[in-house]
Each structure stands twice: as structure tokens, then as C-alpha cells.
Amino acid sequence: MHTLEQLKSGELQGSKLVKMKCGLTTIPKEIFDLSNSLEILDLTGNNLSDLPNDIINLTKLKILFLSDNNFTAFPEVLGKCSQLEMIGFKNNQIQFISEYALPIKTRWLILTNNQLESLPASIGKCHRMQKLMLAGNQLKSLPVELANCKNLGLLRISANSLTSFPDWLLSMPKLSWLAFSGNPFCKDLNEYTTSLEFIEWNNLTIEEKLGEGASGVIWKAIWNNETNQQTPVAVKIFKGAMTSDGLPDDEMNACILAGSHPNLVNVLGKIKENGDNKKGLVLSLIPPHFKILGHTPSFESCTRDVFQSGTTFSLNTILEIAKSIASVAAQLHAKGINHGDLYAHNILIHDSEEEVHPLLSDFGAATIYNKEYRKISCGLERIEVSAFGCLLEDLLTHIEKEDAQKEVFHSLINLHNTCLQEDVMQRPSFDEILRLLEISS
């Protein structure tokens, strides 16, 4: 975090990144002295409500974060920022976006938790758009021009006011990670809310933090149950009423409906809300010898996970991961659940080549959908198949050299291509993928 004093003294000259949180109501003029170097400007958590026209002088600016400020309109001047690719306005009060406000090079746009009722048709001109975060607004529809964004891979439209599913999404060639729960057209979820045990907060002893995701923080805890048994568990505490993916209640309902599976983390109960206690789930504690398969996307990779340098996987490991995740996904879609976040960073594996045992976690982007609408049901599954294809591609990119010559490797390459074909409805179902994996191995 930088200070206003550092900026005004000239200490930040030549900086590519500036991050400031100091109650700003206007952008300091000294920021514009960095026009020859500044690429990332993060002014999250200030009191800004407008941007000066001088912002266009930051000709190298690629990434702009203005979340947790006081904007009521998306600044039109940003449409003139020729190099801007990633824009974050989460948790403002934005009600309006001008037809001229979106930079043509936008790849990643975050508008979570605002007050938007519509989007400009000009969004369809953002042909490089890969990631669009719109959860927690008041959108009644999506502009059909968005269908022109053929590179769109991740879309979050949960917790809006959409009265019908935009079925043209089912023809988006690269759409892989979709979340749309909490809209009026979604299935009534009341039947799931009471089918999980309530656990009193006072019966949980919170210990160390285990991890953190978009929707919540996971803690290690001890559960003192009614029989006075002390059971080590994991507790997921949701960050707030709205996450970047949707509503906590929708995540909890999807977890309940998912049921048990060898490759799912077992849900033990739901924290009983009491006073200031936040919503949360109690889960089986994953043993410490499990590790995250991959890491969340970087600014550069946008929608694709990243892996530590030198990461390699054997062919047997890749096969086990592929079979396990396809099996989980087949069960979820058989029950009408779209996971929405099928990524390596949501998969845990055993830290041993002999026992991989993948576990799919994090239902923060999950949506329960109506299986009776056959076309939509089939299309949603095949959108998720694209995410599976991306996962398979990531793993195969990191295969051990000696395994890259084997016939099974080439069979998996073919499967990956089949999962990612642009004609959505020509992709296989997860049941078909499982059969193909059995043949391949």
C-alpha cells in the first residue's frame, strides 16, 4: 500500500503499480505525472465518485480498481482509455453505464454489487471480453449484443432480476464458467433449506485459518456435538450477504442437494444464525496432506488457472483427476446442479503420487436449475463440459515428458478437443466423457 506522501514527494516516479487507500475524494494530480510508467492503479476503498478527464493521459494504464467507492455512474471518460483491459467497480452504487463508457479492449469487467438495471448495447463491441462479473445488481435482462463477445469465458449474473434464462448463452462458443442463481426465473429452493442439521455457533471452537475464496473464509474448528464428542471440522464463514459469485443461501442449498460422493467434501451441517453470527457451513476436515491442484487466474491469464513453475503430472494422475471430476460433475448435473466454477484451484489432491483422491470444493458459483427444461438442461451441462475441457488442457500442458508419447495422452488430447468444440450442443455429456475415459485408460 502506498501513501499520499510517497506520491507527492516523487518517490513513486517510474512505478508500474500504485495502490492507495487513504480516504481520497479526488484523484491526486501527481498520479498523472506517472503517465509514462503506470499500468495498474488500485484505489479501492476510498471515497471517490467521479474521475477527471486527465485519466486518459495515463496511456499505459491496463488495470484500474475502484471498488468500495461512491460511484453512481460508470465514468464515461474510461471509454477513451485506449489500453485499459481490466476494470473493477465492485461495491459501488452504479446505476448507469453510457454507450460510450466501456473501453474497447476490456477483457475483465467487475461490476458486482451495484444497482444496474441494464447494460449498454455497446458491450457487444468488447470482442476481447473474457470475464464479466455482474452478480448482485438489478438487471432485468441482458443485451443480446453480448452474444457478439465470442471470447467470453466466465459470466456471473446471480442475484439479479432476470425473469427468464437468456437461452442465447447456450450458443456462446467459449462460455465455460456460468453462475445465475438467485434470479426470479430460478427454481424455488425452499425445499432444500431445512434438510441439513443446524449446528450451534457456541458448539464450535474456531482455530486457525485454512484458506479463503471468493465467497468465504475457511477455518479449522472443533465441533462439540450433542454427545460431547469433539470432532475436528472445517467451518466456512461467508464474507457477507453478496459475494462475487452470488448469494450464500444458494451455495448452501447446492451443497445440500449435491449429496455424498467420494470426490466431494462432505457437508456436516449449517451454522444456526444467532445475533451477529454470520452464515456458514460445517464441513468434514480435509487431512493436511491434501494440496490445491492449481492457483486462481492471474491478471494475464484472466480466466485460466496458473500453476507453480516446474509443476508436472503423470498420466495416471491426470486420468484419476479427470475420471473423478467427470464423475462428480455427472452426479451434479443429474440432480440439476451447475457447479459454475470447475477449476483446478477448487480441486484438492492427495500429496502423494500413489493416492491422488481428488476432491471438488467451493459451490459459491453453483446454481440449481430445472431439469424439466431439456434444452437448457443439456446446454448448461455442455457449458460445464467446456470448463472440464479447459481443466484437462491445463493438466495435459504439465504432463511429464516421458508420458507425452503414450497413446493414452493423445486420446486425452482428442477428448479435450471434443469438450472445447465451439458448437456447444455437439460436446459430450459427462456420462459420455466417463465412458470415453474408461476406453482411453
Image (cartoon, rainbow, N blue to C red):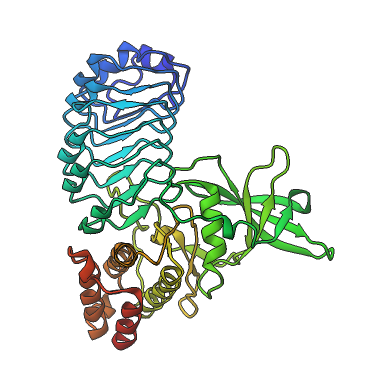
Q: Quadrant of residue 232?
A: bottom right
Residue 337 on image: x %, y %: 44, 63
Relative placement, left or right, of 21 versus 224 is left
35 or 429, nearer to the observer: 429
Above or below 389: residue 415: below
37 or 296, nearer to the observer: 296
Above or below 357: residue 347: above
Is residue 305 something one can see in this rendering? no
Task: Look at the image and tell me in which quarter the C terminus lies.
Answer: bottom left
Question: Which residue reaches farthest right?
Answer: 228
Relative placement, left or right, of 244 versus 143 is right
Q: State how many labels appear.
A: 0
Task: Look at the image and tell me in which quarter the N terminus lies.
Answer: top left
Residue 287 on image: x %, y %: 60, 67
**Residue in the image at 19% along x and 19% along y:** 57
Residue 243 on image: x %, y %: 48, 43
